[in-house]
Image: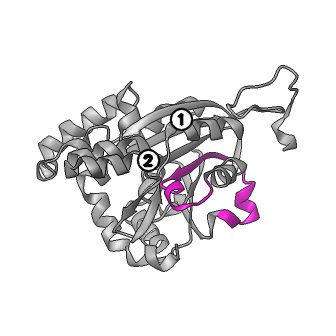
Amino acid sequence: MASQSFDQGVAAWQDWQEAPWGRLRYAVAEADLAPHLAESGSGPMRVLDLGGGDGGDAVRLAVRGHHVTVVDYAPAMLATATRRAAEAGVADRITCVQADVGSLPVELAGGGFDVVLCHGLLPYTPDEEATIGVALGALRAGGLVSVIAMNRHSEALRSAVRTMDPDTVLRALDAPTVHTGMFDTELRLHTAEELTVTLRTLGCDEVHHYGIRVFCDYIPDDAVKFDPAYYARLEHLEIATAGREPYRHTARLLHLVARRELVARRDRRPDGSQSRSGSAKSSSTQ
């Protein structure tokens, strides 16, 4: 997609973020990530937000004291991120870089970041393995990568609730994409199972699976979600069930938090396991 499509959609995107389903996306993602950040240390961390757009995730992390570099190729999105950082009083903790994720500046591509976010980027990219590879390449050994994508398992259920048309649901079962009117494009659908294999194959030895909007998208009455009291109860429910079986598997969005291996290993099988003949070498040689 051209950057103009994203720039022209800034206002609509911000409206979406302020709607209940948009607020849940950021609130649940922050709650999912929080314990993993706490395990990684108490001090400020260096975070790279790939395709970070208007800073929705970045500002939240900066408010918590972390230093975030937002990479996006849409100038209007980055301008909004800069403004939001200033309004939140964290302009000194957020750096915006206009670049394509596939061709990051050298200082970012091998920057040894503590955390790399890949939130909502995979639906727009044709090669998820290459994109995740870029994310892991910018991450220090032992660092965290956070991936949010659209869950293919949810599409048929959502269609059933919203359309009540068996034929539409049947088509949704194997649909590889879904159309978005906001940016007028096809978004690629993924599953946590597939992306977990990719993460393990590329060098992650911990992968934690969460769901975002486990119930929200299946509640047909959208109007009630705007009621503050109802929203507060819904957010509490969503955070409580984000990591629970079986709910995370049918959530509208999948969220994977993985840790890059401290020691890289050879002879990795496609499922991420190691062959017995594999030998270890320091990740610093990669």
Q: Which residue occupies 28% across, 50% down?
A: 167
- Residue 234, placed above or below residue 20: above
| Amino acid of disc 2 | Asp
Q: Which residues are magenta?
A: 102-127
Instruction: Name the quadrant of the C terminus.
Output: top right
Residue 112 at least partly seen: no
256 horizontally vs 138: left or right: left
109 horizontally vs 97: left or right: right
Q: Position of residue 176 (x, y in %)?
A: 47, 53
Number of residues whose C-alpha sits closer than 10 Å to that of mark 2, classed few (under 14), some (14–19) or many (20 or more): few
Q: Position of residue 79 (x, y in %)?
A: 46, 74
Farthest front residue in view: 167
Q: Which residue occupies 36% across, 43% down?
A: 154
Of 18 and 211, which appears nearest the observer? 211
Q: Position of residue 31 (x, y in %)?
A: 40, 37
Residue assigned mark 1: 193
Q: Position of residue 214 (x, y in %)?
A: 31, 37
Report if residue 165 lies within the magenta region.
no
Label at residue 174: 2
Q: Quadrant of residue 145?
A: top right
Of 107 and 25, which appears nearest the observer? 25
Name the element at disc 1. helix
Badge nearest the viewer, 2 or 1? 2
